[in-house]
């Protein structure tokens, strides 16, 4: 059964900003029916049986098989030969932590060709230096969610960022660990439906 989704907004409403929905599918319908606001970003833990995009479901299964009994995938599991059809849409981020162990920034270590065409080439740069606060908040939110749950997570939005034409953005985060305990990178697969706002 698909699990419930947490509705999270960058511009959090009063009272905490957490809204519990009845099901993942119902929340997808709500997101699609909304205006294309970039300040709405939804995060949910990816679990078995969840109704997600076919390409993402296949990638979740592939990464789970590679992970086996380990708590996290490693960078070695991100094999170009095994993931070749996903490569244009992938990103690898290296998190920057504060003294309490929370992700507060991240550095681009790898960008697929489709991601570079959307955001521009940023390999080696910090999110905070390359994007505005909005994108940084999203990255920190979903990264910290993955670390807290020790599981992959899916982020959903209606826009890449303010002023963009593209809608229906899905980002799938996999926490990676070199030592099997501490997350040192995130492997990300992004899917952007290239419909224009005016055609929704």
Image: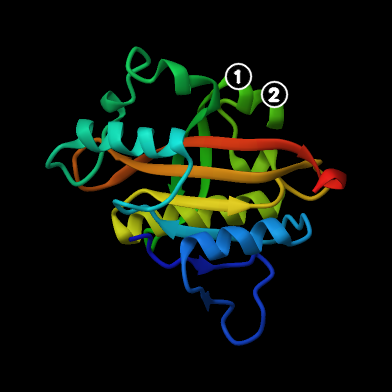
Quadrant containing the N terminus in the rendered view: bottom left
Q: Would residue 104 appear left or right of 129 to someone viewing this image?
A: left
Q: Nearer the viewer, residue 198 or 102?
A: 198
Q: Would residue 128 appear left or right of 22 to someone viewing this image?
A: right
Secondary structure of residue under mark 2: helix
Q: Quadrant of residue 196?
A: top right
Which residue lies at the image location 68% right of the left edge and 56% below the top edge?
Answer: 32
Image x and y of residue 125, in percent = 60, 32
> Of all residues shown, which one is farthest toward the right?
198
Q: Nearer the viewer, residue 129 or 74?
A: 74
Count of numbered badges drawn on the protein: 2
Image coloring type: rainbow
Where is mark 2, residue-wise?
A: 117
Image x and y of residue 153, in percent = 41, 51
Q: Dot 2 surroundings within 10 Å: few (below 14), some, or many (20 or more)?
A: few
Q: Is residue 139 above or below residue 119?
A: below
Report if residue 97 is visible in the image: no
Q: Nearer the viewer, residue 112 or 182?
A: 112
Looking at the image, do the residues carrying marks 2 and 1 touch, with CB atoms under 8 Å apart? yes
Q: Would residue 9 appear left or right of 2 to someone viewing this image?
A: right
Which residue lies at the image location 46% right of the left edge and 23% below the top edge?
Answer: 86
- The circle on residue 113 is 1
> Of all residues shown, which one is farthest toward the top?
81
Which residue lies at the image location 34% right of the left edge and 12% below the top edge?
Answer: 81
Image x and y of residue 67, in percent = 20, 36
Secondary structure of residue under mark 1: helix
Report if residue 168 is visible in the image: yes
Q: Is residue 84 above or below residue 40?
A: above
Q: Quadrant of residue 34?
A: bottom right
């Amino acid at each position: 059964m698909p699990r419930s989704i947490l509705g999270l907004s960058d511009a959090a409403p009063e009272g905490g900003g957490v809204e519990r929905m009845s099901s993942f599918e119902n929340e997808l319908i709500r997101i699609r029916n909304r205006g294309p606001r970039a300040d709405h970003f939804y995060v949910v833990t990816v679990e078995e049986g969840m109704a997600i995009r076919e390409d993402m479901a296949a990638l979740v299964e592939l990464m789970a098989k590679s992970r086996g009994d380990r708590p996290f995938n490693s960078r070695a599991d991100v094999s170009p030969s095994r993931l070749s059809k996903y490569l244009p849409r992938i990103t690898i981020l290296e998190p920057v932590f504060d003294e309490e162990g929370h992700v507060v920034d991240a550095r681009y270590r790898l960008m697929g060709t489709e991601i570079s065409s959307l955001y521009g080439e940023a390999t080696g740069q910090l999110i905070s230096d390359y994007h505005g606060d909005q994108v940084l908040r999203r990255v920190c939110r979903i990264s910290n969610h993955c670390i807290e749950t020790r599981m992959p997570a899916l982020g959903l939005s209606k826009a890449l960022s303010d002023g963009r034409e593209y809608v229906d953005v899905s980002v799938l985060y996999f926490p990676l660990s070199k030592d099997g305990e501490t997350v040192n990178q995130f492997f990300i697969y992004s899917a952007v439906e290239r419909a224009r706002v005016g055609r929704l």
